[in-house]
Image (cartoon, rainbow, N blue to C red):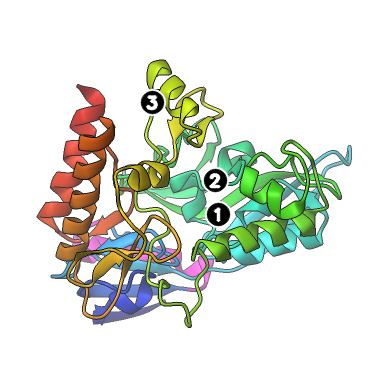
Amino acid sequence: MHARVHVPLAPLTTLGIGGDAALIAELTDPAEFPEVVALADREGARPLVLGGGSNILVADAGCTVPVVRMATKGAKFEHGDDGEQVTVTVQAGHVLQDLVEQSIAHGLTGLETLIGIPGTVGATPVQNVGAYGQEVADVLDRVTAWDWAVGREVTLSAEDCLLGHRTSIFKHSTRWTLLTVTFRLRPSKLSTPIRYGMVAEALGVPKGTPVPLADAASAVLAVRRSKGMLLDAGDADNRNVGSVFLSPVIDAKQAEKLLAEQAPVHTFPDGVTRVSASYLIKAAGFGLGRPLAPGIRMSGKHFTLVAEGEATARAFAEAARVVADAVQKSTGIRLTPEPDLFGDEPAYLRLKQKALASTTS
């Protein structure tokens, strides 16, 4: 394990914003994790974990808490005796894109529409990562993690992880550091049924149709590319965190009204109905490419925020506030910002707290 001090965090995130890590350690060998424990003991603080940096806002003043950059690699595929499922145990630092491509190459369904999502496998249960009809909750079997509260490695079942819409028991908690993730995948030449209209349209099939795995992945990549949701160094909208806001929960009356407007309303596996945050942002009158704060603007392709030039975390928080306030004024629905914060950015924390207060009142 290699540890360094005063390391800029902005280049390690897709947003490219923020100050330095006071101390950062890169873990490439799982056997060296005890060194991470020793480092945390010396510093007197549980570390924050950084994977691909694709859902992180780093404060302008940086981060004083130790940061571990998880860079462990490896995926072990094990076929069950009945041939009906394959378990895949993956190191937390393994790149998600690589795992999705490996699963497709092995003829396994369950992850194919997650292609193109940046980041590492260890982050997927934390966020219950999902896209275009699939999410980690559908295929998660178990995780292994270091439990800082009890000082030992533990195994948690999918049920233990309390997965919800882009959340889990791990979200907003430093109690656990994920070490491996095990998925249950199904041998098949075909994808799960295509549920999203844009993907079905790209494939030229009705919604609900399974298609060859590689075709499903190609269509998802095409849709993501059209929205500027793929990391591409040559793309002017490249500095982003994907979706800045969670798709908000709506009640039956709101759902009826929004469906009449042909809004993208979906009922998720947990039984909760949500509407696309992007739709609400557009409905609130924001245009693509619109400047919102110094160095922060709306993407030119999709209703999300992108950074440019000398953007700051404070400006990002201000832009997110402008959008959230306008959506609430226009629709009565409060948006919740999704990216995790490394360090202290009061305006961003206030924005998250305001969203939490609106959902609990």
Question: What SS does tag 2 mark?
Answer: strand
Residue bearing the label numbered 1: 180
Mark 1 vs 3, N-terminal side: 1
Residue 164: image location, x then y, percent: 46, 34
Per the model, the C-alpha gap separating discs 1 and 3 is: 34 Å
2 and 3 marks in contact (CB < 8 Å): no
Q: Where are the magenta residues, as a range?
A: 28-46
The answer to whether residue 76 is seen in the rendering is: no
Residue bearing the label numbered 3: 250
Instruction: Kindly identify the residue that appears in the image at 74 percent across and 36 percent down.
Output: 208
Per the model, the C-alpha gap separating discs 2 and 3 is: 31 Å
Rendered image quadrant of residue 292: bottom left
1 and 2 marks in contact (CB < 8 Å): yes
Residue bearing the label numbered 2: 143
Per the model, the C-alpha gap separating discs 1 and 2 is: 6 Å
The answer to whether residue 228 is seen in the rendering is: yes
- Of discs 2 and 3, which sits in the foreground? 3
Q: Is residue 43 magenta?
A: yes
Rendered image quadrant of residue 324: top left
- Residue 105 vertical placement versus 10 (above, below): above
Label 1 is placed on what type of residue?
A: Thr
Question: What SS does tag 1 mark?
Answer: strand
Mark 2 vs 3, N-terminal side: 2
